[in-house]
Amino acid sequence: MTQDFETDYIVVGAGSAGCVMAARLTEDPATQVTVLEAGGADRSPWIHIPIGYGKTIVDPRLNWRFETEPDAEIGGRRMYWARGKVLGGSSSINGLLYIRGQAEDYDLWRQMGNTGWGYESVLPYFRKAEDQENGSDTYHGADGPLRVSNLVERNPLCDAFIKAGVRTGIPETQDFNGASQEGIGYYQLTTRHARRCSAAVAYLHPARKRPNLRVETGALTRRVIFEGRRAIGVEAEINGHTVTIRARREVILAAGSINSPKLLLLSGVGPAGHLADMGLPVVHDLPGVGENLQDHYGAIMSYKARRPLTVNDIMASPLRQLQVGLQYILTRKGPLTISAAQVGAFIKSSPDVATPDLQFLFQTFSHDEYDEGLHKFSGFANVACPTRPESRGTLRLKSADPAEAPVMQANYLSAANDRRILVEGMKISRAVMEQPEMQAEILAEHSPGPDCRSDDELLAFARETGLSIAHQVGTCKMGNDPMAVVDPTLKVRGIEGLRVVDASVMPTLVSGNTNAPTIMIAEKAADILRGRSLAPAELRHERPQAEPA
């Protein structure tokens, strides 16, 4: 039977941030850290084979499989949200893309009152985390735990998409994470030797050799325990037993943008009225908990291919599945090494926009809903996604039961500007597909189809079929305003001994994928806890300055 015990730091969640915190804090041999992960070990081979995200994204053994409330702006649909429930968290099931966002994203955080979170201050932590295949430079590190690799499988469809994009006027880029994000090109992946390099692989597993790190899987944290307004530990259910774990120093919530605010609410920290409605005692009235929910929403435009070059073709043929499986086992090459999107672009929805506000995710496969699998024809797709949505949602408890999922209201496309940018993105995507390089590969547009032409028709299609890109952030936002949940040191405002370290602290969604920024946040948080900081990078003379909006 698991017994009550004491430790220096409790880290709730072994996801992208929690793994970093565990590894960095235990670099000090005098510091004892306990990590609590509700999921299990990351043993599934589909976690480690790059293309395995096609299975892990729907696997209930590895995935919380959240579902939102019906959303009026997307036809009353509920949205499926895949979030990792396993060592490595969502970094063990995501699409493997390494994207940081724009320098301007972090400068905005600083301008919102978050001292120390401007681009020059966070870049050293991106570099610290990174083991860049192409070597180190001003923007990249090559000595960190997180391997960032080039895509080894170059499908002719991807090259055609890049050439078509360049023909429309999009500049080609070799690096979305360098001096400028704008352009079209190949994505880089968080892989090492053609295997997924999750936060667990990069950080947690090497650190588990240390005697001062304890990792408990199958551990559902029920609530934070307080003495007055100081967090002193947590109550968790481990292997069917309720255990009290005391923290001599701090409790760190790294459970993600859904479970961190949920845990605060269950612990009596949040909007007092909502806590009273749930029958929970109020430890601290903090109205911003569960507010400011943001996510990327994408419209999928799919095409029937002239040639059998797609993942759809592989999955339709047992013989080809066997062939690519053997190719991967013997050479670590082939279609099993690909990310969820292999090439993409960051572009402006109009000439008046200062920096790119649209992302393209080009995929050598096609599908509708995740659970339905791939289309039965040779198909590929491009996803158009506004990168800085203005729509905001909320998260609330459904009940006081820690095992029950919260109520998530995403409010996708509730902001008019999000709708406008999405439609523009679909039109630009179509313009790329109409170029000769892509026309040579396209048999027909499958969806939305050639009859869908006007802005209203495109928006209706996006409302009815668009999907979450699984980049939920913001529900414990960092700041100094009345709706902020944590301060710039990530301490929960009005509470002692409690921090939140994960994507929920982002005050605004970054312009792109969220795994790399979440790892950066944790790298910086670990230094904050240890009373140190990397010197800011001096880059203002090296990167182009955006024109005033």
Image (spheres, rainbow, N blue to C red):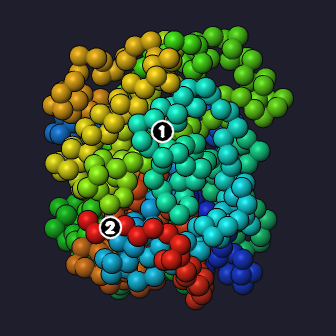
Kindly identify the residue that appears in the image at 48 percent across and 46 percent down. Answer: 171
* Residue 72 against residue 86 in the figure, above or below: above
Residue 103, given in percent of the width and then of the height, sits at: 45, 67
Residue that mark 1 sits on:
166
Near-viewer residue (39 or 323): 323
Residue situated in front as seen by the camera: 541 or 13: 541
Q: Which quadrant, please, contains the C terminus?
A: bottom left
Q: In the structure shown, which secondary structural element does the residue marked by tag 1 occupy?
A: helix
Q: In the rendered view, does 178 fall on the left or right side of 256?
A: right
Residue 514 placed where, x, y %?
47, 55
Residue 467 in which image quadrant: top left
Give whichever of 486, 342 is nearer the camera: 342
Whether residue 16 is visible to the viewer of this picture, yes or no, is yes
Q: At 77% across and 70% down in the image, what residue appears? A: 210
Q: Residues within 10 Å of mark 2 (few under 14, many from 20)?
A: few
Image coordinates for residue 186, horizontal then vertical, percent: 58, 42
Which residue is most to the right?
330
Q: CA distance from mark 1 to mark 2?
A: 23 Å
Looking at the rendered structure, which numbered label has been put on residue 522? none
Seen at 34% across and 21% down, the residue is 447
- Amino acid identity at mark 2: Glu
Q: Is residue 50 left or right of residue 60?
A: right
Q: Amino acid at mark 1?
A: Val
Residue occupied by mark 2: 547
